Amino acid sequence: MVVKVAINYLGEGLEIMELINEGNIGLLEGLNSLSEEDDIDQFLSPLVEESIQHAIRNYNNRSSPNL
């Protein structure tokens, strides 16, 4: 699941392994709050995406010159 989501963000500034690592962080955080009633993919995919998006925003903020 993480690799599938990470591939969608190639070209946003981070290498694929960085995207996967960030997605894994979201996955692990989501697993901590997963309940038996939750559909795993529907519950965890948004958390993986959010973690990757957050990393991309941080990367872009660091690499943008302050005006």
Image: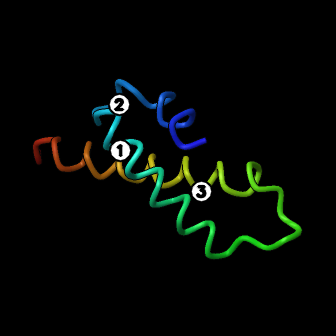
Quadrant of res 67: top left
Of badges 3 and 1, the one in the foreground is 3
Colour scheme of this structure image? rainbow
Q: Which mark is residue 1?
A: none
Q: Which residue is mark 2?
A: 12
Q: Is residue 67 left or right of residue 57?
A: left
Quarter of the rendering containing residue 2:
top right
> Which residue does the image show at 76% across and 55% down from the upper left?
40
Q: Are marks 3 and 2 in contact (CB under 8 Å)?
A: no
Judge depth for marks 3 and 2 and give the one in front.
Answer: 3
Residue type, numbered disc 2: Glu
Residue located beneath label 3 in the image: 47
Instruction: Tell me which amino acid carries mark 1.
Output: Ile
Q: Is residue 38 left or right of residue 16?
A: right
At a point 28% along the width and 33% down the height, the residue shown is 13
- The residue type indicated by label 3 comes to Leu
**Is the Cβ of the residue at disc 2 closer than 8 Å to that at disc 1?**
yes
Density class for disc 3 (Cα within 10 Å; few <14, some 14-19, many ≥20) is many
Q: Which mark is residue 56?
A: 1
The disc, 3 or 1, on the residue closer to the chain's N-terminal end is 3
Compared across the picture, whether 28 is left or right of 65 comes to: right
Q: Nearer the viewer, residue 67 or 10?
A: 10
Mark sitting earlier along the chain (3/2):
2
Residue 21 location (% of width, % of height) = 38, 50
Query: Residue 1: x, y in percent?
Result: 61, 41
Dot 2 crowding, Cα within 10 Å, few <14, some 14–19, many 20+: few
Quadrant of the rendered structure where residue 9 is? top left
Mark 2: which secondary structure?
loop
